[in-house]
Amino acid sequence: MVDVGELAERIRSTDPAVGLRAVGALHRLAEQVEAAAVASARDQGWSWEQIGDALGVARQSVHAKYGK
């Protein structure tokens, strides 16, 4: 689990290496949250089009990423 307070502190760091690692951690966290939300939506019967609309992307891109 990501410690949000620690991550926020790292983002404010003046050390570029620390800040960039924090950005990487944010990207990984966002991917995990997105995957869980997509799985939940599919379990509840949402179409790929509905999910794509909610994420602001084409249904094809969501299906290509998560449809396997």
Image: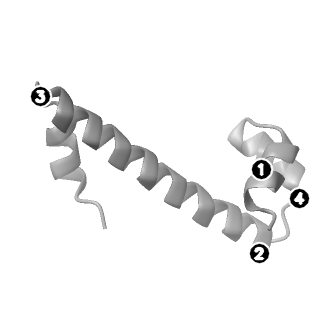
Q: Earlier in the sequence, mark 4 or mark 1?
A: 4
* Side (left or right) of 65 relative to 32: right
Residues under labels 1 and 2: Cα distance? 15 Å
**Alpha carbon distance from label 3 to label 2:** 42 Å
List the residue tagged with mark 3: 15
Mark 3 Cα shell of 10 Å, populated few (<14), some (14-19), many (≥20): few
Disc 4 marks a residue whose amino acid type is: Ser
Query: Residue 2: horizontal and vertical position, in percent?
Result: 29, 60
Q: Secondary structure at mark 2?
A: helix
CB contact under 8 Å: marks 3 and 2: no
- Which of the two marks, 4 or 1, is nearer to us in this view? 1
Query: What residue does disc 1 label?
Result: 62
**What amino acid is at disc 2?**
Asp
Nearer the N terminus, badge 1 or badge 2?
2
For mark 2, does the 10 Å Cα neighbourhood hold few (<14), some (14 to 19), or many (20 or more) residues? few
- Residue situated furthest bottom in the rendering: 43
Q: Are marks 3 and 4 in contact (CB under 8 Å)?
A: no
The residues tagged by marks 3 and 1 sit, at their Cα atoms, a distance apart of 35 Å
Residue at 17 percent across and 37 percent down: it is 18
Colouring scheme, one of rainbow, by chain, secondary structure, one colour = one colour
| Amino acid, disc 3 | Asp
